[in-house]
C-alpha cells in the first residue's frame, strides 16, 4: 500500500484520563452534606461507588425514622445522636479510603 500525495497519514491521539477525586474532597463531601443536610453517601458517589453511597444514604434515613419513633420512649434522643456521629465518622473514613484505593489503582494502570 503506497501513499499518494493527496493522502495524509493518520494521526492517533492517546488520551489518559486521571480522576481528580482526592481523598480529602471525598471525606469533606461525606462530612459536610451529611452534617448539614443529613445526606451521607455523597463522598462515596463522588469516588464512583454509587451503589455504596446510595446504600449509606438510605440506611441512614431508615435509621433516622427508627430513632424518631424511639423518641417517644426517650431513648431515641440518645440513639439518634449516636447514629449521626457513627455515620459521620465511619462513612467519611470509608469514603477517604475508597478514594485512596481508586487513586492507587489509577496510578498502577499508567
Image (cartoon, rainbow, N blue to C red):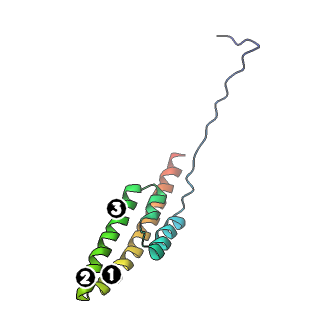
Query: To which residue does mark 1 refer?
Result: 80
**Mark 2, residue position:** 70
Q: Residue at x 47, y 72 (%)?
A: 31
Left/right of residue 3 with respect to residue 26 in the rendered view: right
Total residue callouts:
3
Residue at left 51%, top 50%? Answer: 106
Alpha-carbon distance for marks 3 and 1?
Answer: 18 Å
Give me the residue at 38% from left, 73% from top: 87
Task: In this rendered view, identify the residue nearer to me: 41 or 101.
Answer: 41
Q: Mark 2 against mark 3, which lies toward the viewer?
A: 2
| 54 sits left or right of 104 in the view | left
Residue 52, position in %: x, y? 37, 59
SS at mark 2? Answer: helix
Earlier in the chain: of badge 3 and badge 1, it is: 3
- The quadrant where residue 4 appears: top right
- The CA distance from mark 1 to mark 2 is 9 Å
> Residue 20: x, y in percent?
57, 56
Q: Which residue is painted at 72% across and 20% down in the image?
A: 8
Q: Identify the disc placed on residue 55.
A: 3
Amino acid at each position: 500500500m503506497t501513499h499518494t500525495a493527496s493522502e495524509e497519514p493518520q494521526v492517533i491521539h492517546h488520551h489518559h484520563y486521571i480522576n481528580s477525586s482526592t481523598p480529602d474532597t471525598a471525606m469533606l463531601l461525606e462530612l459536610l452534606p451529611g452534617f448539614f443536610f443529613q445526606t451521607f453517601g455523597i463522598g462515596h458517589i463522588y469516588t464512583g461507588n454509587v451503589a455504596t453511597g446510595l446504600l449509606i444514604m438510605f440506611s441512614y434515613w431508615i435509621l433516622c425514622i427508627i430513632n424518631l419513633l424511639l423518641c417517644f420512649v426517650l431513648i431515641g434522643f440518645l440513639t439518634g445522636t449516636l447514629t449521626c456521629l457513627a455515620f459521620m465518622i465511619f462513612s467519611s473514613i470509608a469514603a477517604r479510603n475508597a478514594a485512596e484505593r481508586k487513586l492507587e489503582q489509577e496510578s498502577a494502570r499508567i
